Image (cartoon, helix red, strand yellow):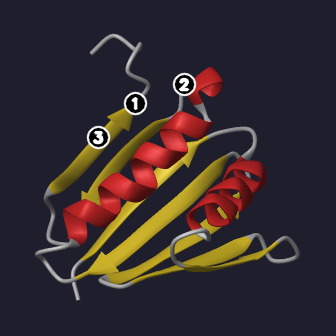
């Protein structure tokens, strides 16, 4: 199954992962473990994982080729909106070597 990853540099990876899981949990099945710093997102068309690491939040999405970009967009756009003050940058890299979507605060210069 195609896969895409983004490593988001932040001083608050646990906070953002927990917020993302909580928010998306209104529409899809989610899990978040404060103890391990990991979470899971179960979408109808694929899955996502959240891993809080020192200084970064690792995001991963897996789906069929038709839906991979949509999952990148859902996860990345929500995270950037939550982290607007921290100017988070979410740059997806697909397992086939292609670049995925790029998410940044709309006010950021391109």
For mark 3, give the secondary structure.
strand
**Where is mark 2, residue-wise?**
87
**Where is mark 1, residue-wise?**
104
Q: Is 47 placed left or right of 41 in the picture?
A: left
Residue at position x 44%, y 57% in the image: 75
Q: Quadrant of residue 23?
A: bottom right
**Where is mark 3, residue-wise?**
102
**Distance in Å between CA atoms under marks 3 and 2:** 13 Å
| Sequence-wise first label, 2 or 1 | 2
Q: Are marks 2 and 1 in contact (CB under 8 Å)?
A: yes
Q: Are marks 3 and 2 in contact (CB under 8 Å)?
A: no
Q: Quadrant of the N terminus?
A: bottom left
Q: Quadrant of the C terminus?
A: top left
For label 1, the crowd category at 10 Å Cα-Cα, with few meaning under 14, some 14 to 19 and many 20 or more, is many
Q: Quadrant of residue 93?
A: bottom left
For mark 2, give the secondary structure.
loop
Q: Exactly how many numbered labels are in the figure?
A: 3
| Sequence-wise first label, 3 or 2 | 2
Q: Nearer the viewer, residue 75 or 59?
A: 75
Q: Position of residue 53 (x, y in %)?
A: 69, 59
**Distance in Å between CA atoms under marks 3 and 1:** 7 Å
Q: Is residue 5 above or below residue 108?
A: below
For label 3, the crowd category at 10 Å Cα-Cα, with few meaning under 14, some 14 to 19 and many 20 or more, is some
Q: Position of residue 81 (x, y in %)?
A: 52, 35
Residue at position x 11%, y 75% in the image: 66
**Distance in Å between CA atoms under marks 2 and 1:** 7 Å
């Amino acid at each position: 199954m195609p896969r895409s990853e983004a490593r988001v540099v932040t001083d608050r990876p646990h906070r953002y992962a927990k917020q993302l899981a909580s928010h998306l949990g209104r529409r899809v099945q989610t899990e978040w473990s404060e103890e391990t710093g990991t979470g899971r997102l179960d979408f109808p068309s694929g899955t996502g994982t959240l891993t809080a690491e020192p200084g970064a939040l690792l995001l991963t999405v897996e789906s069929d080729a038709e839906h991979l970009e949509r999952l990148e967009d859902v996860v990345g756009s929500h995270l950037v909106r939550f982290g607007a003050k921290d100017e988070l940058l979410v740059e997806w890299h697909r397992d086939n070597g292609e670049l995925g979507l790029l998410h940044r605060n709309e006010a950021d210069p391109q």
